[in-house]
Amino acid sequence: MSPAELLTLLVGTPSVSGEEGLLADLLQNLVAGQGLDVQRQGHNLWFSFGKKGGARLLLNSHLDTVPPCAGWEGDPFTPVWHGARLQGLGANDAKGCVAAILLAAFELAKQELGGEVVVALTAEEETGGEGIATLLDQLGPLDGAVVGEPTGLRVCAAQRGLLVLKCTARGQSGHVAHAQMLGAENAIHKAARDIAKIAAMDFPAHPLLGTQKAQVTQISGGLRRNQVPDACEFFIDLRTGPEQDHEALAADFQRQLESEVAVHSRRYLPKGTDPNHPIVRAALQAAGKAGPVGSGTTSDWAFLGDIPAVKAGPGDTFRSHRPNEYLTLPELEAGAAFYAALVPAFFKMQVQHEG
């Protein structure tokens, strides 16, 4: 199957997050047809090949897509080639990466390698559900990982995490006409003071990720226009760096704010890999890049624990989750060549690293 045919097949098989079953069926048969022993749990697939007992490298990307948004020209589930560009839901995020990994894996499986490759094509990345995090104990120990996401083959050695805090300002209800006499405390005013503090907060810069600001993304409060509000709720979204601990950050917000602070979500942990680690050096060599970059978006890397990893793949992150998403054939072919070159380079560098 040619690269163009494989990408067309993937994009033409709908797989909105949670509904990846049809695509998982198709790929299970495709991989088995290559003589590889494919395992399955739910809508997650994995298989391995190469030298047992050596270093083990994970190649991972996700099968699911977001639902189609408004603004598509034509049916988002019907792949359409415009010259060398394939348009369709998931073409960029991240079925191009899936196709490139498979193309590389099918060629690498025929070669003698210095270690073992584990390929995991997983579900529900877009929703943080039953995906890669549920498989790690079955994949065995891993010495490195590559997470396939559309980065333009730039090698991301750091990735922001996500901390969401739910804040509740408490006040005292009363008639607006009597508020000053009663000394009623306005919860919205309290929340406003806290929001102003949040907007002024600064956080340390990261060498690859730069600086970040906490953002208040939702706010609600008050029952009636003539009643002093006794509660106001708002949410803080903070994209964290590898040096930031989510629990410590939440405690620090609580010390600085008048409102009550509770952790709403902290499971997307920030990640960073030493630029001198073999996985980073091998990826840079394969991509022909001088140095790594950082990524502000989350991915399944967040769930890989302490496994040294990078995020890299064909496509452009700014095309993701937008109408008329596409990938070009040259991008796909470059992605397959990148993964195929990275694997042997990693095994060679890992032996040198361990020696």
Image (tube, rainbow, N blue to C red):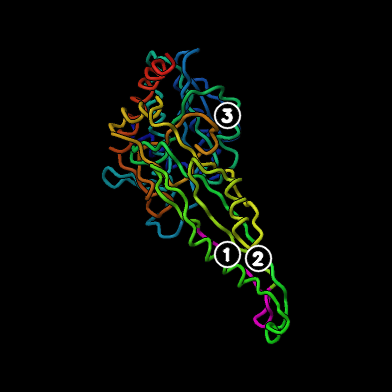
Q: Is residue 245 above or below residue 187?
A: above
Q: Is residue 161 above or below residue 31?
A: below
What amino acid is labelled 2 in the image? Ala
Residue placed under numbered mark 3 in the picture: 136
Q: Nearer the viewer, residue 282 or 202?
A: 202
Residue bounds of the magenta highlight:
215-229
Circle nearer the N terminus (3, 2)? 3
What amino acid is labelled 3 in the image? Leu
Please report the residue visible at 36 percent of the width from the left and 26 percent of the height from the top.
282
The reply to whether dot 3 and dot 1 touch (C-beta < 8 Å) is no
Please report the residue visible at 46 percent of the width from the left and 18 percent of the height from the top.
55
Residue placed under numbered mark 1 in the picture: 194
Q: Nearer the viewer, residue 173 or 156?
A: 173
Circle nearer the N terminus (2, 1)? 2
Residue at disc 1, secondary structure: helix
Q: Is residue 334 above or below residue 346?
A: below
Residue at disc 3, secondary structure: helix
**Is there any visible trace of residue 127 in the rendered image?**
yes
| Residue 239 horizontal/vertical position (percent) | 49, 50
| Residue 325 horizontal/vertical position (percent) | 38, 50
Residue placed under numbered mark 2 in the picture: 169
Disc 1 residue crowd, few under 14, some 14–19, many 20+, Cα 10 Å: some
Residue 311 located left or right of residue 174: left
Disc 3 residue crowd, few under 14, some 14–19, many 20+, Cα 10 Å: some
- SS majority, magenta: strand
In the picture, the quarter occupied by the C terminus is top left
Q: Residue furthest left?
A: 83
Disc 2 residue crowd, few under 14, some 14–19, many 20+, Cα 10 Å: many
The Cα–Cα distance between marks 2 and 1, rounded to whole angstroms, is 9 Å
